[in-house]
Image (tube, helix red, strand yellow):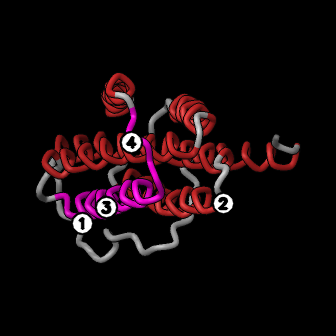
Amino acid sequence: MFSIDSAITEFDKALRVVAGISSATRVNPANALPEETLSLSQKRHSAGLMRVNQVGEVCAQALYQSQSHRASDPNIARQFDLAAQDEQDHLSWTTARLRELDSRPSLLNPVWYAASYGLGTLAGRLGDATSLGFVVETERQVEAHLASHLERLPREDLKSRAIVEQMRQDEAAHGQHAQALGAATLPAPLKRAMRAFAKGMTTVAYYI
């Protein structure tokens, strides 16, 4: 059970994540690349896709935080924490890219965070193997989603593409690590429900 201090800490984390306030431990992969000239439509499209990706990182922070707190195995909790640090890098990078594109994060970030925290809590309560299975399936879907963004981003947008590619590699590694720790295979109906939720979220976040 959480103490008052831990509850306050978690609330502070939530506020920072929702506001896009994060510090990366790794160098932004876009830093060394030139800012190519994009048309207005290309810029808006890139911003929409990067807003979706930023929402994904908000959700990832909520998921990993809630799952880490409910893991019974310290090694699994540590893996969740390590993955969360990578996701914090992603959050920092995508937030910075949105600013460069003269855009903003999703106005619904508090909703996405709360929903994801609830899902992570539920997964954690079902046991470590199920919680790890949730990570494997989530990261599998996210990796496919990021691969599609690499197809959809303007070829001229080298900075966004570099960020998305590094994110894709990291998400694949998170899924592999979760699998190695003993992830259970999730039922097909749950996988479909996860895809439906992700589809709705990404569609809305592109615009709002």
Q: Earlier in the sequence, mark 1 or mark 4?
A: 1
SS category of the residue bearing label 3: helix
Label 2 neighbour load within 10 Å: few <14, some 14-19, many 20+: few
- For disc 3, the marked residue is 163
Kindly report the distance in space between the C-alpha atoms of the residues bearing marks 2 and 4: 21 Å
Q: Earlier in the sequence, mark 1 or mark 3?
A: 1
Name the amino acid, label 3. Answer: Ile
Q: Earlier in the sequence, mark 2 or mark 4?
A: 2
Instruction: From the top left corner, tell me how far across and down residue 46 is, in percent.
Output: 25, 47
- For disc 1, the marked residue is 35
Q: Residue at x 33, y 32 (%)?
A: 202
Out of 196 and 127, give the one closest to the viewer.
Answer: 127
Label 4 neighbour load within 10 Å: few <14, some 14-19, many 20+: some
Instruction: From the top left corner, tell me how far across and down residue 174 is, in percent.
Output: 41, 58
Magenta highlight range: 157-186
Name the amino acid, label 2. Answer: Pro
Indicate left or right for 119 with 71 as reference. left
Indicate left or right for 83 with 199 as reference. right
Residue 74 disc label: 2
Number of marks in the image?
A: 4
- For disc 4, the marked residue is 138
Q: Residue at x 39, y 47 (%)?
A: 136
Residue 82 disc label: none
Name the amino acid, label 1. Answer: Glu
Q: Is residue 145 above or below residue 91?
A: above
Can you tell which quarter of the image residue 119 is in? top right
